[in-house]
Amino acid sequence: MGGKGKYAAFVGTLTNGSHNEWVAGAYEKAKSDYPGIVRVEDPIESKEDADVAYNKTKELLKKYPDLTGVEGSSANDVVGIGRAVEELGLNDKVCVMGTSIPSMTSKYLATGAIDKIFFWDSALAGQAMLNMLEVLSGGGEITEGMDLGVAGYESIKKIAGTTVGWSGAAWVIVDKDNMDQYNI
């Protein structure tokens, strides 16, 4: 989007905590760092259904012909959004990004209807948790900034509002240039 333009954000359900946190975070980041970016509506519910995301994206693009970006939170959102953008021939006009996996999105990544997807490698997350368990079972303590010896978990952070929640930075970013590296 180049730091400016209008966008819409999808969530799988309006009650999905993580999806709503992601779109709220993106909205706050845009407001603070990119004043030229405007979200056109409150988050839109896809019901975790690619066909719903597809139909609602087509409605959005009719209502807002100057829409330049769409964010999807559910893996199915991104597929439906990409399909709508592809069918309407807007690959070079609408930036599509969101959480999904290559096996669902590669067709639209290849054509540019989807620009980027993001996901987490569950094997790395599992290894990080096992490493935490090893520390704890040895009488150690998990601390802010700790390196768990796993890519993306070199400096973990405590998740606010939890007693045992920790996060890393292990997301995987995929576009048409690297999608073939992932068999997921």
Image (cartoon, rainbow, N blue to C red):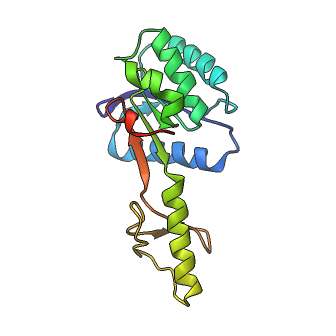
On screen, residue 182 above or below 129: above
User: Residue 111: x and y, percent?
Assistant: 39, 18
On screen, residue 62 above or below 24: above
Identify the residue at image location x=39%, y=22%: 110
Quadrant of the rendered image containing residue 161: bottom right
Q: In this view of the protein, which residue sits in the foreground, 3 or 73? A: 73
Quadrant of the rendered image containing residue 109: top left
Identify the residue at image location x=42%, y=9%: 89
Asked if residue 25 shows in the view, the reply is yes
Identify the residue at image location x=38%, y=61%: 151
User: Left or right of 26: which side holds 54?
Assistant: right
On screen, residue 172 above or below 97: below
User: Left or right of 183: which side holds 52?
Assistant: right
User: Residue 94: x and y, percent?
Assistant: 40, 21
User: Residue 2: x and y, percent?
Assistant: 29, 31
User: Residue 1: x and y, percent?
Assistant: 33, 29
User: Left or right of 158: which side holds 95?
Assistant: left
Pick out the residue farthest to the left. Answer: 2
Identify the residue at image location x=51%, y=65%: 127
